[in-house]
Amino acid sequence: MNHDFRHVFHIHKLRKELKEVYASQMIERFASGLVVVFIPVYLLIIGHGVMDALITLMFAELITILTSVPAARIASRLGLKHTILYRIPGPMFLVLWLYAMPYMEISFVNLAIVGIAWGLSRTFYWISINSEFVENCDKLHRGEEVGFFLALPIIISIGSPYIGGVVLEFAGFPVLFSLFIALMFISVIPLFLTEDYRKFFGFEFRDVSFRLVNRLNVGLFFQGFLLIAEFLLWPLYSYIALGDTISTGLVASLSAMGIAFFTLFAGREADRISRRKMLVVGSSGYFVVWILRYLVATPLEFFVVSFLGGFFFVLLSIPIFASFSEKARENNILNYVSQREIFLSLGRLAVLSVIVFGLLDFHTALLLIGITSLLVMVIKLR
């Protein structure tokens, strides 16, 4: 019997359109991994401070909040795949502006421009690619397909920060930025192997709901809080505690490995067991992980809790995204995807604000993140 990777995870049974989504996202995530992780570092190199880098991220989140609904409206008119293509000038402008910044005076305006370009490009991409995925996923295998959608790009991009660092060390930012732009163009090609969905998607402003009483929106807010905590704040805290960039890179890699490989298996199981049970286990386990992160001191302890964090983060993410996809598919996809992006960004903006405005010190903020992981259980799953 053939037990290769494709047959174990039923990749050969996926719709052609869904394979195109996976291929496009893997290339895009690899390209982003080359550059995005170095943007805050680059800002430090050219004379900005840590808070400047975090403020830039806050600008990106504010832009996502303000433009998600208009972006969905535009995508409904242009078509999802064409929208992904037309947003390419956004990341091109971003990297060109970053390259030009050393030749300009250090200013708040430059930070705002970086954040705006970053936020616009990301918003148009995620609204379109998520809508494309929701349209093409299979109800009977939604959990497994969500697993592919979340895990495969992370698996492909695990090594991209290291490659970006090597390119940066030996060739400099111009070569790194050029490689990024080329890969961004290549990432669009798989999507156009089939026709666009321009005529199949509608968008109605009156159907967009921003009610906080909607438990899905509240859950997405808390998930956004945890997303930036896992992918930005925990590696940053590790660097502050360990003072070693190699150890910090290993912390980030172990977290990504835990997320990537457990997602493939947990996604398949999500179609067989209760999503609520998976969410409760993930939420409870993730709470314990963040308490341990508050207490750890040695490098080995950092490595272990990073990998465990990736595992439990998966158990949170899959049931939420699978339920979201199901609800969006039954209603208006673009409406629901735009709402999702807004509430995720509100959550990310909230945790950035806590740190930037000094409401909690960094160490105590770890406990707040742990408590937030328990609050994710308020989300209503289907």
Image (cartoon, grey):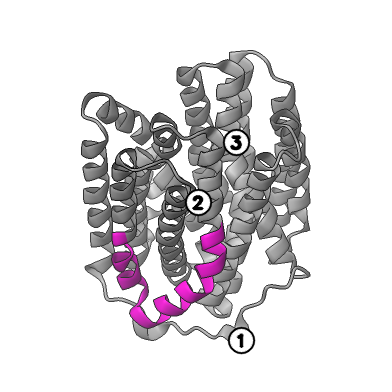
Mark 2 burial class by Cα count in 10 Å: few <14, some 14-19, many 20+: many
Q: What element carries label 3?
A: helix
Mark 3 burial class by Cα count in 10 Å: few <14, some 14-19, many 20+: some
Query: In this view of the protein, can residue 55 be seen by the observer?
Result: yes
The residue sitting at 25% across, 68% down in the picture is: 192
Q: Distance between the residues labelled 1 and 3?
A: 36 Å
Looking at the image, which is closer to me, 348 or 372?
A: 348
Q: How far apart are marks 3 and 2 (CA)?
A: 24 Å
Give the quarter of the image for residue 34: top left
Q: Distance between the residues labelled 2 and 1?
A: 32 Å
Q: Which amino acid does label 2 sit on?
A: Gly
Residues rendered magenta in the picture: 62-89
Mark 1 burial class by Cα count in 10 Å: few <14, some 14-19, many 20+: few
Image quarter of the C terminus: bottom right
Residue tagged by mark 3?
A: 233
Instruction: Name the front one of labels 2 and 1.
Output: 1
- Total numbered badges shown on the rendered structure: 3
Residue tagged by mark 2?
A: 147
The residue sitting at 69% across, 53% down in the picture is: 222
Residue tagged by mark 1?
A: 206
Looking at the image, which is closer to me, 133 or 342?
A: 342
